[in-house]
Amino acid sequence: MSELMNLKIDERFLTRVYRSERVVEIAEAFGIGLDEKEFVVYDGLDLPVKKGDVIYITGQSGGGKSVLLRNLAKQFSAMPGERVVNLDQIELDDSAALIDLIGSDTTDALRLLNAVGITDAFVYLRKPSELSDGQRYRFRMAKAIETGATVWCCDEFLAILDRTSAKIIAYSLQKVARRHGATLIVATTHTDLTRDLGPDLVVNKRFREKVLVERIEEAAARCAERTVTREELQSWIEEFTP
Ligand SMILES: Nc1ncnc2c1ncn2[C@@H]1O[C@H](COP(=O)(O)OP(=O)(O)OP(=O)(O)O)[C@@H](O)[C@H]1O
């Protein structure tokens, strides 16, 4: 069982703007000073994290989700033995069929594709550009497994999918990540994925330094022990979420 770590999140930016005529006009109209300013996004936030956690970062647009995701990815990369992959940045070669783009041989390719729920022979023969957004996401998951990375992160998580598909894929992703012992960190403005991700840690970031951090241990621990059905996960989240 992994130990609880306390990761310190401190993120602030110094902002200074070029004093163009329009900038000065706006500053005068709204009474905004134009000196160099410090913009604090996270003021030494303590984040209780375990390796292998599913971390769900939500909150308002511009609140600081991406900043936190990048910070965590950086902190994990610096830990011995940890390797971070960004699911969105996995390059997909579009010159061949899926079966040729993954795994050391056909058996290995089938193992990886089946692990993420790609089980249709017709889909094995398609190129990445010929997949639906959901299928392409599953293929990225398979590629993430293949990299052997220990931390999988994803910004704007499933934002382009309809919400029903997003929930089904979120459930699959947590299952695959937990089965491989990977830490999963996702960020999105959508707050509807708790019941499908079964997160160990939820961070809800609002403007300025306002942030809610909550560990939902019970349901997550059960998911880590064995593969649970979507229905089980959903009922436990309801039971254990205050
Ligand atoms: N390099 C930077 N310099 C100055 N400010 C920055 C920088 N990067 C981010 N910010 C500011 O930090 C805040 C948080 O940005 P972030 O990209 O994390 O938001 P977000 O919650 O991911 O938003 P969205 O959902 O719109 O992607 C924003 O106000 C942004 O303008």
Image: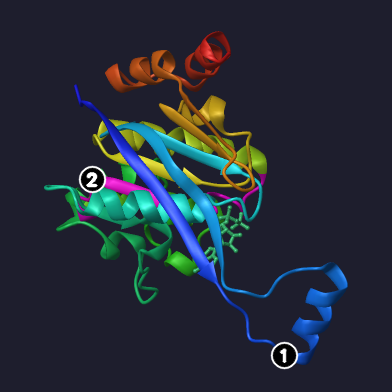
Q: Quadrant of ligand 1?
A: bottom right
Mark 1 secondary-structure assignment: loop
Magenta stretch holds residue 64: no
Q: Which residue is mark 2?
A: 150
Q: Which residue is mark 1?
A: 20
Residue in the picture at 43% in, 63% down: 126
Residue in the picture at 44% in, 54% down: 11
Q: In the rendered view, would you say 59 is above or below 212? A: below
Along the horizontal axis of the image, is 207 left or right of 230?
right
Structural crowding at the residue carrying mark 2, measured as other residues with C-alpha within 10 Å and reported as few (<14), some (14–19) or many (≥20): many
Q: Can the viewer see residue 103 in this picture?
A: yes
Position of the N terminus, as image quadrant, is: top left
Label 1 to label 2: alpha-carbon separation: 47 Å
Residue in the picture at 66% in, 41% down: 163
Is 164 or 43 nearer to us in this picture?
Answer: 43
| Residue at the extreme top of the image, as rendered | 239
Magenta residues, as a range?
147-162
| Residue at the extreme left of the image, as rendered | 80
Q: Which labelled disc corresponds to residue 110?
A: none
Amino acid at circle 1: Ser
